[in-house]
Amino acid sequence: MIDSYIHSIGNNMGNPVESEPLKSDLTLHWIIVGMMLMMLTTYVVICHTVGAQLQQPLPEAQRILIRTVLYAVAIVTFPLTNLIRHIQLRLNQTMPRPQTQSGPVALARSRYLTTVIVSMSLVEVVGILGLVMFILGDGFNTLYIFTGLSALGMFLYRPKTDEYLEIINAIAAQKHE
């Protein structure tokens, strides 16, 4: 049954009607992304509603130094996230199958969920850096820049059906070896 599931998914990736089981497997993954986007939105809303009470302004020279360091951290976060995601995707495909797992689809789903959670958490940090800079006295412009970068990262590292399918196929191929 699982082999026919994988075979039907692999043969019908171009047909949106028959690739629905694959997309429905990623529902929890997309819920995680949605929650992270809601957190970014919450940061902006909080800063707009109670921003004056939150801010504890630092002197301009200190803020510029901290802002520069945090921009560098944000810039480094993207290639680092890409590297970690790439490593996780390869590990998802090559790690041996445990004997207790129910099947390749369930194993692939849980492994890919871990990859999505790690990727989203790393790019969420960029949004938090914007909140930190806002609290330290920077304006909304800095908050929007960091939040926008974080949202961009969530778009770049979103759950992708082709990555998920590759993991399923690799795990299923281990069974036949």
Image (tube, helix red, strand yellow):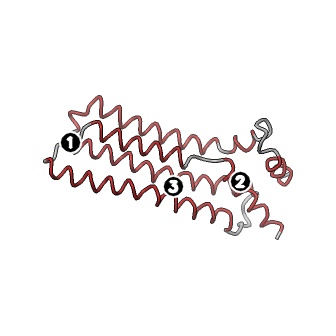
Q: Residue at x 57, y 64 (%)?
A: 87
Horizontal and vertical percent for residue 17?
A: 78, 35
Q: Nearer the viewer, residue 66 or 5?
A: 66
Type of amino acid at the residue the image marks with label 1: Gly
Crowding at mark 2 (Cα within 10 Å: few <14, some 14-19, many 20+) = few
Q: Are marks 1 and 3 in contact (CB under 8 Å)?
A: no
Q: Nearer the viewer, residue 154 or 54?
A: 154
Between disc 1 and disc 3, whose residue precedes? Answer: 3
Q: Residue at x 69, y 44 (%)?
A: 25
Quadrant of the frame with the C terminus: bottom right
Above or below: residue 69 compared with residue 35: below
Q: Secondary structure at mark 2?
A: helix
* Residue linked to disc 1: 137
* In this view, the mark in front (1 or 2): 1
* Residue linked to disc 3: 118
Between disc 1 and disc 2, whose residue precedes? Answer: 2
Horizontal and vertical percent for residue 99?
A: 74, 67
Type of amino acid at the residue the image marks with label 3: Val
Q: Which mark is residue 82?
A: none
Q: Which mark is residue 106?
A: 2
Tell whether 94 sits left or right of 124: right
Tell whether 113 sits left or right of 144: right
Crowding at mark 3 (Cα within 10 Å: few <14, some 14-19, many 20+) = some
Between disc 2 and disc 3, whose residue precedes? Answer: 2
Quote the CA–CA distance across marks 1 and 2. Answer: 47 Å
